[in-house]
Amino acid sequence: MAGLLCAAGTTVPAVADSPAPAPDHAAAPQSGNGLALTPPMGFNNWNSTHCRAEFDESMVKGIADIFVEKGLKEAGYEYVNLDDCWAKPQRNAEGKLEADPQRFPNGIKEVADYVHSKGLKIGIYTSAGTKTCDSAGLPGALGHEYSDAQQFADWGIDYLKYDNCNNLGVDAKQRYTTMRDALAATGRPIVYSICEWGENKPWEWAGGLGNLWRTTGDINDSWGSMLSIMKQNLPLAAAAGPGHWNDPDMLEVGNGGMTDTEYRTHFSMWSVMAAPLLIGSDLRKASAETFEILSNHEVIAVDQDPLGKQGTVLSSAGGRWVVAKEMQDGSRAVALFNETGSAQRIATTAEAVGLPKADGYTMRDLWEHRSYNTAGTLAATVPAHGTVLLRVAADGKWAAHPPAVELGLESSPLVEAGRTATLTTTVTGLGRTPAKSLSALLTGPAGWQLKAVSPTGSPTLPTGRSLTTRWQVTAPAGTPTGAYDLTLDARYRSPDGARVRSTVPFRTHVVAAPPAGTGYLGDLPQLSATNGWGPVERDTSNGESRAGDGKPLTIGGTVFAKGLGVHADSAVEFYTGRTCTTVTAQVGVDGESGAKGTVAFEVWADGRKAASTGVLTNAMPAQPLTADVSGAQVVRLVVTDGGDGIDSDHADWADLRITC
Ligand code: GLA
């Protein structure tokens, strides 16, 4: 099962708990509690510990200490939240919840007092069901809403995450309304976080109930999961606003399954989406880079903008995303997000993101912490999986900043070892003012030869003009296939003489043409690979988590010795060097996925879809797939979620062959 969405109804006894409260207990329904006027910020242990033993009192107190010591409290992080597994399996004789004595020997009140003593707030978790999601069968609040809410208030709880497991099929709106009323009846301000995974479209009805609602299944610490959740959450922008937010789940920044570039994308996009920023890594062990990402106050300011708008998608063609968020001061936060595995030019304009027509604009790069002037074009070459996050204003102050330039790479960044390839770089003036005394330099890994064969400088670069330079690039013979970074470095002066330097890494791949004849495509080196859960597995099913945790590839009871086991949403790219003709495979949902898996397969030959299936389910036998990939430099194998989210979507490219 993917997604850790615990099946409702597992080991559920009959509801032995007290009946739903009589109406006279209930406060008058209210449409808002006045809380979370900006998206909640804080910490939750789930993504780093799940129910493991390290989730305990010392962790919670340690995080509160770090919030204060490392400036995170000052940056806006406020809630220290306990997820599942804080409770004892049994209620006490009075039907009250008690803390697990191993994890919280001094009880929850004592931890809450500690967190409060630091000027912070504390959150807790339970389920709108008879039991929580953990297999230990811990007590849920269904039928106990009023007494549990009062218990939380008595402990000093400030935030409740209310999950969906073991809900006995009771209507979601009803379950979440009862707890809303129970929280209101305590009289304590408690942020109310609805966690029914988007199953009942809460964005349509929860605005008057909760301060936030999960829009998707659980996130995990992988690029594919983060991307899939982002794509599900982006279209829901209209539902978000002060006091009521879409919740695309907690942050994975710092947990180790993504690169720092990918974590910066995660943090940028969650901020542009006005998502709750709940840190999900154990800060007691976090790297300097993790703190730097989580503490970026300019990005946090995008998330916390009091206007409370969620950014909207202006374009996403070819995995080049432009997402713009209106800010209270009239400026726009603009994310140029590159979903693809190679550097991409992503461009828009100040007017397209909603700014008024003006002479020039101030364009601030929120990761570089530098401001430029632009005549109107907002553009950058964005590294693979990266995001350039800008804040752009028609504030009349553009003249105080140097002109922006855009660095670009024109030709394909694939090189074969020992053979000279020609790459073309560009430096384009975007500024309202010209860039002066411009020079460009391309550098690569040690041992590589890079030689300019056309001019590398220009005395002046007016708006819209480019310095184009051709470079001969040679990776030494024998360089292993794989990804390498080249760096383009532009130096120039603003009209007032100030020196400016702008650099961008271009991911290059050293590639080798596949051997002639028919062979197993899965055995060739991968140019790039993304997956919804765990890594792409060679010759086994996806397995879901660690590398090597798969089983034999099995579709409809038939076992296959060779192929790739993936998890939607997935894309795997191979270099085929324009020398191959056909890809064939037997495709389907792997038997390990359980009944829920639904996927669709696509084979792409460069930008052309060469073959695809309809939606396939677990009940279906393997389907043969044949794709004509003649002339393609790159073949891309894609698995989508079949339109119903990625849960349980284990997919096999079995008996996967290529003819070259
Ligand atoms: C569900 C939720 C998660 C987490 C776990 C705890 O899966 O969606 O965020 O709270 O339960 O068991």
Image (spheres, rainbow, N blue to C red):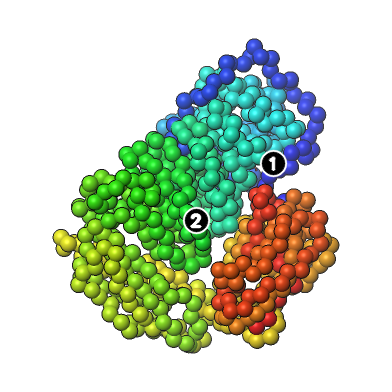
Q: Amino acid at mark 2?
A: Ser
Q: Residues within 10 Å of mark 1 (few under 14, many from 20)?
A: some
- Residue 103 visible in the picture: no
Q: Residue at x 69, y 27 (%)?
A: 142
* Residue, disc 1: 134
Q: Position of residue 159 (x, y in %)?
A: 53, 31
Query: Which residue reaches farthest front?
Result: 357
For marks 1 and 2 on the same chain, the one whose residue lies earlier in the sequence: 1
Q: Secondary structure at mark 2?
A: loop
Front one among 458 and 128? 458
Q: Quadrant of residue 637?
A: bottom right
Q: Residue at x 54, y 79 (%)?
A: 511
Q: Secondary structure at mark 1?
A: loop
Q: Amino acid at mark 1?
A: Asp
**Residue 316 numbered tag:** 2
Q: CB of residue at label 1: within 8 Å of ligand 1?
A: yes
Q: Quadrant of ligand 1?
A: top right
